[in-house]
Image (spheres, rainbow, N blue to C red):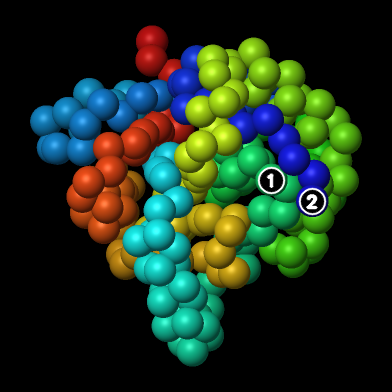
Amino acid sequence: MLTWTPLESNPEVLTKYIHKLGVSPAWSVTDVIGLEDDTLEWIPRPVKAFILLFPCSETYEKHRAEEHDRIKELQEQHPDDLFYMRQFTHNACGTVALIHSVANNKEVDIDSGVLKDFLEKTVSLSPEERGKALENDKEFTADHQALAQEGQTNAADHEKVIHHFIALVNKEGTLYELDGRKSFPIKHGPTSEETFVKDAAKVCKEFMARDPNEVRFTVLALTATKQ
């Protein structure tokens, strides 16, 4: 398995990264400083995705295994144009979360470049094939590595704690959790453009509630660039 340098949850670095990949400067990655209603109001609008960074604790892994078994039995249906991919490249979860955030929001313009090329060549592939395509994409690897190393403050910290990025998006009125380590997308109930921010915050709170003694959570959002 290919190993990348992990991305930091630094909104400035991640914004620079998506712009380098071809995302329009009209969109940025922003800190979500709190999940209560009053602090959620501070996030620039519109908000197209939440990105959650969390530690992969034993509690989380137990929940993930139980969730997999439960949903596997349901054989849920998803929109044909939901872009979902598996993660096979070690430490690529930040890039995968950003791809999930951008690819599932058609209002987010993407200029010619690495990301647009990747999405066009993987549009008809399976989630597994998309994960393999990312692993074999030399340009994507180079761009990730350049930005990851620029934002890195202490690589040793990442050797001790395994953190993981996921994306939360509104796809056709359903709140989806898109996590490349899982075998399929996870539905979190109905949502809308008006309620998405509060609905996504609620899902983030559920992650935190499962690990009440853990404080290493970071929430970001893909939003309109603040004027």
Q: Residue furthest bottom?
A: 73
* Residue topped by disc 1: 90
> Dot 2, how many residues are within 10 Å of its Cα: few (below 14), some (14-19), or many (20+)?
few
Front in this rendered view, residue 178 or 47: 178
Report whether residue 142 is seen.
yes
Front in this rendered view, residue 114 or 59: 59
Report whether residue 79 is seen.
no
Quadrant of the snapshot with the C terminus:
top left
Residue 160 x/y as whole percent: 51, 37
When the figure is inspected, residue 28 is found, relative to residue 99, above or below; the finding is above
- Label 2: state its secondary structure: loop
Residue that appears at 35% across and 61% down = 59
Q: CA distance from mark 2 to mark 1?
A: 7 Å
Residue 41 x/y as whole percent: 19, 29
**Does residue 166 appear to the left or right of 205 in the view shown?**
right
CB of mark 2 within 8 Å of CB of mark 1?
Answer: yes
- Label 1: state its secondary structure: loop
